[in-house]
Image (cartoon, grey):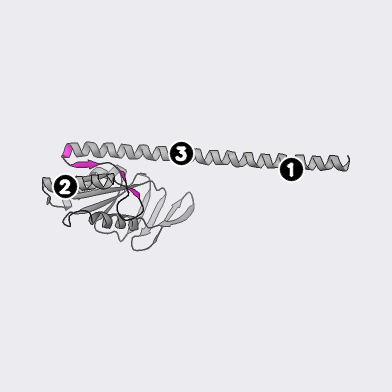
Amino acid sequence: MSIDQKYYLGIGLGLTFLLMFLIAILVIYIFVKRNILRKSKKNNESIKKLEEFLLNYSKENNVYFIKKNHFKSLGMPSCDIGPFLITDKGLIIFYPNFLNGKIEGNCLEREWYCTYENRKKIFPNKMFFIDKTINKLSTKLPKDIPIIAVFLFMNNDVEVDIYNTPSYVLITKEENILSSLDEINNSLTSSLTTDKVNMVATKITNLIKK
């Protein structure tokens, strides 16, 4: 084999390996993208199921329901919050999550831990986001409106070890949502008139539209 032949053979092999590498990258990208889309679709379906349950609950109990929405006017980076229930006892904000495995966290510290499939990872304390959104929302509402946050695990198999939880936050799982709502109702007294309930619903709706 001549030098020229070896040279062209080397270029050909190099281009072949480069093409194979690019194809492998493309296959991995498509696989990851497809998994992300599949997971996103599944999560959206779970949120829709939750909202359907809360809508039926609101009709049966004569309370306001507002679905999860995108807020841009809270003086913080735009974010999705909700769904909401508004009763004569206060404003209930749901914060659904899709965490898996074992979740450990101190609500007074910046980092929480998730152990899943023998891997442990660190992620930000979710209570900080809840506190921030509640503080921002409370500035837009009358000061006498009780606000309760429900940190809702949509995965019922998750193991939860979260402590030093704020008094206005209830941590529960999707399978226990009805009993958690009963717990909230039993722990609060009716303090809001129909007019004030309507006003809170209107203010939240207006915040969504901005």
Between marks 1 and 2, how big is the CA–CA gap?
Answer: 69 Å
Count of numbered labels shown in the rendering: 3
Between marks 2 and 3, how big is the CA–CA gap?
Answer: 38 Å
Q: Residues within 10 Å of mark 2 (few under 14, many from 20)?
A: some
Mark 3 touches mark 1? (CB < 8 Å): no
**Whole-percent x, y for residue 106 in the image:** 35, 61
**Whole-percent x, y for residue 68 in the image:** 30, 43
Q: Check if residue 22 falls in the magenta segment.
A: no
**Whole-percent x, y for residue 40 in the image:** 42, 40
Residue type for callout 3: Leu
Name the N-terminal-most of marks 3 and 1.
1
Name the N-terminal-most of marks 1 and 2.
1
Q: Residue at x 57, y 41 (%)?
A: 28
Q: Secondary structure at mark 2?
A: helix
Q: Residues within 10 Å of mark 3 (few under 14, many from 20)?
A: few
Q: Nearer the viewer, residue 173 or 69?
A: 69
Between marks 3 and 1, how big is the CA–CA gap?
Answer: 34 Å
Q: Check if residue 61 falls in the magenta segment.
A: yes
Q: Secondary structure at mark 3?
A: helix
- Closer mark to the observer between disc 2 and disc 3: 2
Q: Residue at x 40, y 38 (%)?
A: 42
Q: Which residue is mark 2?
A: 199
The picture quadrant where one finds residue 169 is: bottom left
Q: Secondary structure at mark 1?
A: helix
Q: Residue at x 58, y 38 (%)?
A: 27
The disc at residue 37 is 3
Q: Which residues are magenta?
A: 60-80
Name the N-terminal-most of marks 2 and 3.
3
Residue type for callout 2: Met
Q: Residue at x 62, y 40 (%)?
A: 24
The disc at residue 14 is 1
